[in-house]
Image (spheres, rainbow, N blue to C red):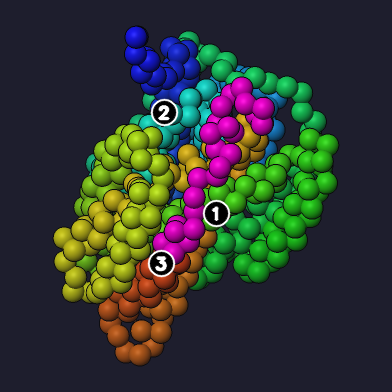
Amino acid sequence: MPSNPTPSTPNLSGRENVAVWVLLVGAFVMILNETVMGVALPRLMDDLGITPGTGQWLTTGFLLTMAIVIPVTGMLIIRVPTRTLFLAATTLFTLGTLLAATAPGFPQLLAGRVVQASGTAIIMPLLMTTVMTVVPPQIRGKIMGRISIVISVAPALGPTVSGLILQHLEWRWLFLFVLPIAVGVLVLGALKIPNVTETRDAPIDVLSIVLSVFGFGGLVYGLSALGEAAVGGGLLAPWIPLTVGGVALALFLLRQVRLQREDRALLDLRTFRSRTFSLSVILLSVSMMALFGSLILLPIYAQRVLGLDILGTGLLMLPGGLLMGLLGPFVGRWYDAFGPRPLLIPGAGIVALGLWGMTLLSEHSSVWFLLGMHLLMSLGLAGVFTPLFTMSLGSLPEKLFSYGSATISTAQQIAGAAGTAVFITVMTLGSARAAGGGATETAALAAGVHEALLWGAGLSTGAFVLSWFLRPAPAEPAAAGASGPGA
């Protein structure tokens, strides 16, 4: 009797594979650009004659724009074809890069960063929605592993690239370096990227857009203002934008609950009916707080306490990013083979262990110990991102993929701003207490870093405990299929 044929592993078609790869390259370039400003701020302060509080707007303005635009992308992905939306995003990013590279002063440079952020905000939700729509469930882990590379490696490479450029060239080259790559991605997309998702008419609720601008924008600005206020900067007291943002966000959520009954919501909140999605968003937010908090804190510690220069600091952060990148494809394949829990639970535990190890840092610590703890944390994050992305979106019906992607990207931005603000604020207050007790400037800063990392370690421990309660939703296989009745 003939034996039953062994089912073959599904693969992407040629056009779908091209779409995913072009989106990945575009996302990598844009997110890399997001973190190049950190180590460049002292140079920009000198060259443009600006204060630290003013210079912070180059990062705050970027995050603020992202937080405002991302909630709208769920609706845009439904209404606009993949190719058109990708070309719009890359055109905005390229124009913003050109504006920043040729800026005669700070206002024009800030405007360039805002235009860049408008394009960047579209690309990640578009990438994740495209993957969830066209990639078969059996190989989603592998493709999400590639997205994890973009999410984790690009921010880590930003300070290294910035340090290498600023070691020898002026700040404009931060953008002149990116400009030809952005143009290349735009041309590649115009030539190669197909339309791979179906579109339909979706109503635009203007009031929802206004409320989302004040809600998400107010929260991100308020969180960033906390960090600015801690270092003596900022235009407004943090409680003002936080209050405005909180009230506007509450009104926004109430309106979405009402509109989603008629499928008219700007950001459909039925995604949170999935317990898996809700817990995944919480864990992903904590992970992004740890990533971005360490990206802002460790360079300060390395330069002000250990005495490294800009280039040395950038190179110190590089191995962790490379480790996450090298592990990304393997983690994706392990996810497809073994499921999420054998990766997620150990990963969350290793992140917590790395942050607890960092709490041992002092003014006399070795650079090698810092590098080792950063590598340990990066190892854990590599095991966390792919399962969370895949589980969260895989637990949703297909019609909610675009809204789920927008929600995840919004949570990432708010968590990144919160991680940056909280780590900087706790560090500054801790340093002030130590200095008041008679500690030297270096010892006081080391004490502040210790307090901030202690807070992060406690938060990551809570995430590790929560990871034990996260399981793939029973509906995930059905939701993942394109033809299931629930899709």
Binning the other alpha carbons within 10 Å of mark 2 as few (below 14), some (14 to 19) or many (20 upward) gives some
Look at the image and tell me whether residue 70 can be seen.
Answer: no
The answer to whether residue 476 is magenta is yes
Where does label 3 land, which residue?
461
Instruction: Verify CB contact (< 8 Å) between mark 3 and mark 1.
Output: no
Q: Work out which residue is located at the far front of the displayed protein and give it.
A: 1
Q: What element does badge 1 sit on?
A: helix
Q: For mark 1, what is the residue?
A: 279
- Which residue range is magenta in the image? 463-487
Name the residue nearer the viewer: 39 or 372.
372
Q: Earlier in the sequence, mark 3 or mark 1?
A: 1
How many C-alpha atoms fall within 10 Å of the one at disc 1: few (<14), some, or many (≥20)? many
Q: Position of residue 62 (x, y in %)?
A: 54, 46
Q: Kindly report which numbered mark, 2 or 3, lies closer to the viewer in this rendering.
A: 2
343 sits to left or right of 369: right
- Say which quadrant the C terminus sits in: top right
In the image: residue 215, left or right of residue 467: right
Q: Residue at x 27, y 79 (%)?
A: 443
One can see residue 267 in this view: yes
The disc, 2 or 3, on the residue closer to the chain's N-terminal end is: 2
Q: CA distance from mark 2 to mark 3?
A: 31 Å
* In magenta segment, residue 479: yes
Q: Quadrant of residue 405?
A: top right
Query: Where does residue 338 sit, x and y in percent of width and height?
Result: 35, 40
Is 257 drawn above or below residue 435 in the view shown? Answer: above
Mark nearer the N terminus (2 vs 1): 2
Which residue is identified by label 2?
139
Rendered view: 305 above or below 128: below
Of 319 and 53, the residue lying toward us: 319
Predominant secondary structure in magenta?
loop
